[in-house]
Image (cartoon, rainbow, N blue to C red):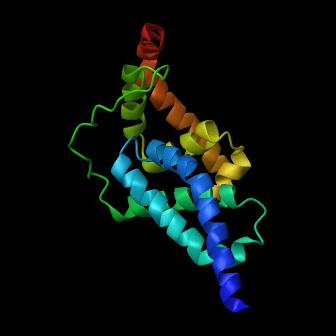
């Protein structure tokens, strides 16, 4: 009985991982400002942590949202481990853009602007505007107050506007 239950849980987790992996990866790419290797590591770490908790996850209403929370907290924890001065030196590789996809120049400009934000500000932007979470949901995911989310959000958007300014309109219009 225990072995079949363990196998059923493993199958359930594999189904969850297959269904949520792409979304987690896209979110991780935004958090890491397009560093696909670090994004893959974040997703792997997140799924590893989710697997370790999978037996208890059944009590969680929304495992996908919980996985996003684990992803953000893992990202923030990793960022604390590294020096604030560490930055990848290699340029982002030119990746083929599927037909009908966003303009590569716009995508690179946005990723560069996100890269220049502090990690916590980047996490707020990703959760609030990419994930479309409320201030309270974002605060819960980041383990901070709602006021801290509002402050970081305002500061991050001001930095993005200052960095991108009119060039964002030009880049968006040129595509």
The residue lying at 59 percent from left, 69 percent from top is: 50
Q: Is residue 13 above or below residue 2?
A: above
Front residue of 31 and 24? 24
The residue lying at 79 percent from left, 62 percent from top is: 61
Q: Position of residue 81 (x, y in %)?
A: 36, 65
User: What is the quadrant of residue 111 in the picture?
Assistant: top left
The furthest residue to the left: 89
Q: Is residue 24 above or below residue 143?
A: above
The furthest residue to the bottom: 1
Q: Position of residue 82 (x, y in %)?
A: 32, 61
Q: Position of residue 168 (x, y in %)?
A: 45, 17
The residue lying at 20 percent from left, 44 percent from top is: 89
Front residue of 153 and 137? 137
Q: Is residue 142 visible?
A: no
Front residue of 99 and 61? 99
The residue lying at 51 percent from left, 70 percent from top is: 48
Q: Is residue 108 above or below residue 25?
A: above
Q: Position of residue 84 (x, y in %)?
A: 32, 53
Q: Is residue 152 left or right of residue 1?
A: left
Quarter containing the N terminus: bottom right
Q: Is residue 90 left or right of residue 101?
A: left
Q: Is residue 45 visible?
A: yes
Q: Is residue 21 above or below residue 50?
A: above
Q: Is residue 47 left or right of residue 64?
A: left
């Amino acid at each position: 009985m225990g072995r079949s239950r363990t196998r059923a849980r493993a199958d359930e987790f594999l189904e969850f991982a297959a269904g949520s992996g792409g979304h987690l990866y896209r979110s991780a790419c935004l958090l890491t400002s397009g560093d696909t290797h670090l994004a893959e590591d974040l997703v792997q770490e997140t799924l590893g942590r989710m697997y370790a908790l999978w037996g208890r996850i059944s009590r969680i209403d929304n495992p996908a949202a919980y996985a996003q929370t684990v992803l953000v907290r893992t990202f923030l924890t990793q960022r604390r481990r590294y020096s604030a001065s560490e930055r990848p030196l290699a340029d982002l590789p030119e990746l083929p853009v599927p037909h009908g996809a966003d303009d590569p120049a716009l995508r690179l400009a946005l990723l560069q602007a996100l890269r220049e934000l502090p990690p916590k500000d980047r996490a707020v932007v990703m959760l609030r505007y990419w994930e479309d979470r409320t201030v309270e949901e974002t605060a819960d995911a980041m383990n901070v107050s709602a006021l801290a989310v509002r402050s970081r959000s305002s500061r991050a958007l001001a930095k993005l506007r200052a960095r991108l300014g009119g060039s964002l309109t030009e880049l968006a219009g040129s595509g």
